[in-house]
């Protein structure tokens, strides 16, 4: 029983990381039907923000807290830059954007390599987050994982409230649901796109800060983790956050359970088969916006 | 494909086709002269075997041009099919290299096995292995395509799925070290159907085999593109719903292009093994798979020879630049993904079309 619970928590914690990353992706994907391949490098930018801040501010806890908003803004601005310079030009060719943002990701990786060096760098975790929590005698969970879970849930809550209640949230929803109608109604869709990209990319920065607590920081840290986050967005469906939340946690739990009963390498194949099977049932993802378009 | 028989005849009347067929024959002749006549004379042994490697990339690119340029399916997972073909070939060659009754060298090294795994056994048969290099990727593509296209999963969704399969296969192969060689892959391949690959003369022969395969693949792609099926494929790319309303099933149309592209990638993988002497997860994962696409974008995704030439050019630039300036190469590669796609979506091939249009104001298919 303890074993199952501990695997369950591992799964939830994998899911929380996926959720943090996929939240930003689903926002930008839902907005412009574009998958930003450079999202992983925005995560790395967030992680390097912690690294740089720790050079300046010695206290690990303080620097982590400061890093959260700073990483949000830095990654957000980088996202806006990508949107303004490239994605906006390819609005009629969404698939091409995939290739172009992959090019951006290659360049950013090399920039990280040239600035911070190719080897991974380390950051100090605050002492509060290095320990672990003993739930029972056998069930031990690390506090950094709990912190990430709380962070992910906080991001979901903030985003949900923001989308439901604020004027900006209403505009974002309007553009996602029907871009043409929103434009005809007098919405500056271009400005909404940029703000959406800022928030979505900023969330990647936050995810990067969180990842410094559980793994090494390197130029390609984003690429390794991003493929599963793309899958979460595809399976979750676009336009609604609940799909992303449910699928992120389900995928995390399924992965940890399958990995435990088989091996990591078999699990990756099984998870893929499960996803293709799932798409037979819900080809547009778990939740989709009902529209009258044919697609 | 009975559904194609009723296809309306479009702009390509037979009168217009005749000169184009003539032009294509001249093109093939020229390519054959360059590949078989000029290159082996001008290039030394080392350069020629590098060219063989580039030509393998070109074979994959022709398939991607068909699936993506003509069919609108951006496949970021051709590495899967390249890998299946490559591993099928390498498994046979490893078995042929091993002493009779002995396991291949890496299996003895890891020492977990007493006997050959059951799924290795059929690959000892050369005919089975050769057929599997092309048919196995096509079978996988058929199954996956049936499941994906029938449910109308497309666009970015399809691209992401194809990429995820690639990641899954690479992780799977790395994990099964005892039977697949793990991260190292299958290396140190000595012979190719009885011929010693260390002999420069035999390496030249491998080059000729690869060059012939590229010409054959170009021929297949040309036939498909100029057929009614080719026009239907472009129609599905440009207006899938319209084609559906006309009574065709777009899923079948896309499936054919996807399966053919997979077979081409498998063939390329199989030829890559004797040409380079290795196949490993690092050659078939997410990154190499998306790099297959870049040559296609540079050369011209919808044209026939554009993808092949683009792939050769990009592979050559990689060798030339990455050895001397690894950092500069990555920046350059990033720009290669960005600039042609943003500013020249038709690739270099569209420049040729532009020149031709200036000479004679005639409609040239994109």
Image (spheres, coloured by chain):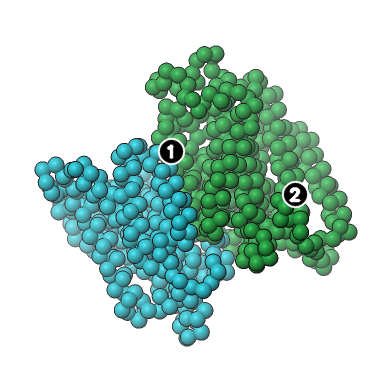
Chain colours: A cyan, B green
Of mark 1 and mark 2, the one earlier in the sequence is 1
Q: Chain of mark 1?
A: B
Callout 1: few (<14), some (14-19), or many (20+) C-alpha neighbours within 10 Å?
Answer: many
Please name the residue that numbered disc 1 is placed on: B172
Rendering coords of residue B193 (x, y %): 64, 22
Please name the residue that numbered disc 2 is placed on: B222
Callout 2: few (<14), some (14-19), or many (20+) C-alpha neighbours within 10 Å?
Answer: some
Residue lying furthest top in this view? B100
Whether residue B289 is visible: yes
**Which residue appears at 73% of the width and 58% of the height?**
B231
Q: Are the residues flagged by discs 1 and 2 in contact, CB closer than 8 Å? A: no
Relative to A125, say whether A183 is above or below. below
Relative to B317, say whether B40 is above or below. above
Rendering coords of residue B57 (x, y %): 62, 42
Q: Quadrant of the C terminus of chain B?
A: bottom right
Residue lying furthest left in this view? A137
Tell me: B111 left or right of B239: left
In this view of the protein, which residue sits in the foreground, A172 or A239? A239
Q: Chain of mark 2?
A: B
In this view of the protein, which residue sits in the foreground, B81 or A217? B81
**Which residue appears at 52% of the width and 66% of the height?**
A86
Residue B302: quadrant of the picture: bottom right
């Amino acid at each position: 029983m303890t074993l199952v619970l501990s695997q369950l928590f591992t799964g939830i914690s994998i899911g929380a990381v996926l959720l943090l990353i996929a939240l930003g992706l689903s926002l930008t994907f839902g907005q412009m039907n574009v998958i930003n391949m450079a999202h992983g490098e925005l995560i790395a930018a967030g992680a390097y923000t912690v690294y740089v801040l720790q050079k300046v501010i010695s206290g690990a806890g303080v620097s982590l807290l400061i890093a959260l908003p700073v990483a949000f803004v830095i990654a957000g601005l980088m996202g806006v830059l990508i949107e303004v310079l490239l994605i906006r030009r390819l609005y009629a060719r969404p698939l091409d954007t995939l290739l172009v943002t992959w090019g951006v990701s290659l360049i950013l990786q090399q920039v990280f390599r040239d600035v911070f060096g190719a080897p991974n760098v380390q950051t100090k975790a605050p002492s509060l987050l290095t320990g672990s929590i003993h739930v029972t005698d056998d069930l031990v969970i690390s506090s950094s994982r709990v912190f990430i879970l709380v962070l992910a849930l906080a991001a979901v809550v903030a985003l949900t409230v923001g989308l439901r209640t604020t004027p900006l949230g209403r505009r974002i929803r309007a553009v996602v649901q029907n871009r043409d109608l929103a434009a005809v109604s007098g919405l500056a869709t271009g400005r909404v796109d940029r703000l959406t990209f800022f928030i979505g990319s900023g969330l990647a920065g936050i995810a990067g800060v969180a990842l410094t607590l559980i793994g090494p920081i390197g130029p390609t840290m984003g690429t390794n983790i991003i493929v599963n986050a793309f899958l979460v967005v595809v399976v979750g469906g676009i336009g609604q956050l609940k799909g992303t939340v449910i699928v992120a946690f389900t995928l995390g739990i399924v992965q940890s359970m399958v990995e435990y009963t088989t091996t990591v390498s078999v699990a990756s194949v099984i998870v893929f088969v499960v996803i293709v099977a799932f798409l037979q049932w819900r080809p547009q993802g778990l939740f989709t916006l009902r529209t009258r378009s044919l697609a | 494909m009975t559904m194609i028989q009723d296809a309306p005849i479009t702009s390509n009347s037979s009168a217009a086709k005749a000169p184009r067929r003539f032009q294509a024959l001249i093109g093939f002749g020229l390519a054959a002269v360059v590949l078989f006549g000029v290159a082996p004379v001008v290039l030394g042994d080392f350069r020629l075997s590098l060219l063989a490697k580039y030509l393998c990339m070109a074979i994959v690119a022709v398939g991607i041009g068909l699936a993506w340029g003509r069919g609108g399916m951006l496949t970021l997972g051709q590495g899967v099919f390249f890998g299946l073909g490559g591993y099928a070939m390498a498994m046979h060659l490893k078995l042929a290299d091993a002493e009779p009754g002995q396991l291949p060298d890496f299996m003895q090294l890891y020492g977990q096995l007493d006997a050959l795994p059951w799924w290795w056994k059929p690959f000892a048969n050369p005919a089975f292995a050769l057929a599997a290099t092309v048919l196995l990727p096509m079978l996988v593509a058929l199954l996956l395509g049936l499941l994906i296209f029938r449910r109308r999963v497309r666009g970015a969704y399809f691209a992401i799925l194809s990429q995820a399969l690639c990641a899954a296969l690479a992780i799977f192969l790395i994990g099964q070290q005892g039977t697949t060689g793990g991260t190292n892959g299958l290396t140190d391949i000595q012979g190719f159907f009885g011929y010693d690959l260390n002999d420069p003369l035999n390496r030249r022969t491998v080059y000729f085999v690869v060059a012939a395969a590229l010409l054959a693949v170009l021929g297949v792609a040309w036939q498909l593109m100029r057929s009614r099926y080719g026009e239907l494929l472009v129609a599905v790319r440009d207006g899938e719903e319209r084609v559906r309303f006309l009574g065709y099933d777009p899923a079948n149309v896309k499936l054919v292009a996807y399966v053919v592209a997979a077979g081409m990638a498998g063939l390329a993988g199989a030829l890559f093994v004797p040409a380079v002497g290795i196949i490993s997860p690092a050659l078939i994962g997410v990154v190499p798979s998306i790099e297959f696409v870049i040559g296609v974008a540079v050369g011209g995704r919808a044209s026939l020879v554009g993808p092949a030439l683009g792939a050769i050019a990009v592979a050559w630039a990689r060798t030339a630049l990455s050895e001397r300036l690894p950092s500069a190469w990555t920046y350059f590669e990033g720009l290669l993904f960005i600039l042609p796609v943003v500013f020249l979506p038709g690739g270099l091939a569209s420049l040729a079309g532009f020149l031709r249009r200036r000479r004679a104001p005639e409609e040239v298919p994109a």
